[in-house]
Image (cartoon, rainbow, N blue to C red):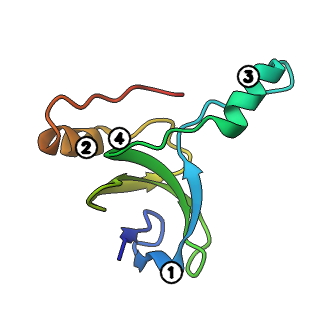
Amino acid sequence: MLRLTCPYCGVAAEETELAPGGEAHLARVGPEGSDDAFHAYLFERENPRGVHFERWRHAMGCGKWFHAARCTVTLEVFGTYPAQTTEPPAHIRAAITAKRPGWAWRGLS
């Protein structure tokens, strides 16, 4: 079972206590965006085999949203961090790189 630690309240919660929120670090499309850009924002998402950054809500706890870096194959969790963070913290990127040589942060989608 997937266990994530909420960066706000520090509780290590099982996935049944959390609510998934999809891919993290998406570039939002505003009113000035084209129909094609809005379509891509809504429907064209990453679904990688390997390292993935996701949004989660601690639904049965403090209720706050946070981001998690994990491997979709092994369920290995590299770390969690506040949702207001615009990119994964350096220590999480370093943890991923240490276990996945050649991996690199690709920036905002």
Q: Please tell me how crowded label 4 is: few (under 14), some (14-19), or many (20+) other residues with Cα within 10 Å.
A: few
Q: Nearer the viewer, residue 67 or 62?
A: 67
Local secondary structure at mark 2: helix
Viewer-nearest residue: 39 or 19: 39
Whole-angstrom CA distance, mark 3 to mark 1, is 34 Å
Query: Which type of secondary structure does the marked residue at label 4 adopt?
Result: loop
- Label tally: 4
The circle on residue 89 is 4
Q: What's the CA distance linking mark 1 and mark 2?
A: 27 Å
Residue at image coords 40%, 72%: 10
Locate residue 59, reporting x and y percent: 60, 75
Camera-side mark, 3 or 4: 3
The amino acid type, in three-letter code, at marker 4 is: Pro
**Separation of residues labelled 3 and 2 (CA atoms):** 32 Å
Mark 1 or mark 4, which is nearer the start of the sequence?
1
How many residues crowd around disc 2 within 10 Å: few (fewer than 14), some, or many (20 or more)? few
Residue at x 28%, y 45% (from the top left corner) = 92
Q: Secondary structure at mark 3?
A: helix
* Residue type at tag 1: Thr
Q: Which residue is mark 2?
A: 91
Dot 1 corresponds to which residue? Answer: 16
Residue type (three-letter) at the residue carrying disc 2 = His
Q: Amino acid at mark 3?
A: Ala
Instruction: Residue under label 3, please give it.
Output: 37
Q: Earlier in the sequence, mark 3 or mark 2?
A: 3
Q: Quadrant of the N terminus?
A: bottom left
Name the element at disc 1: helix
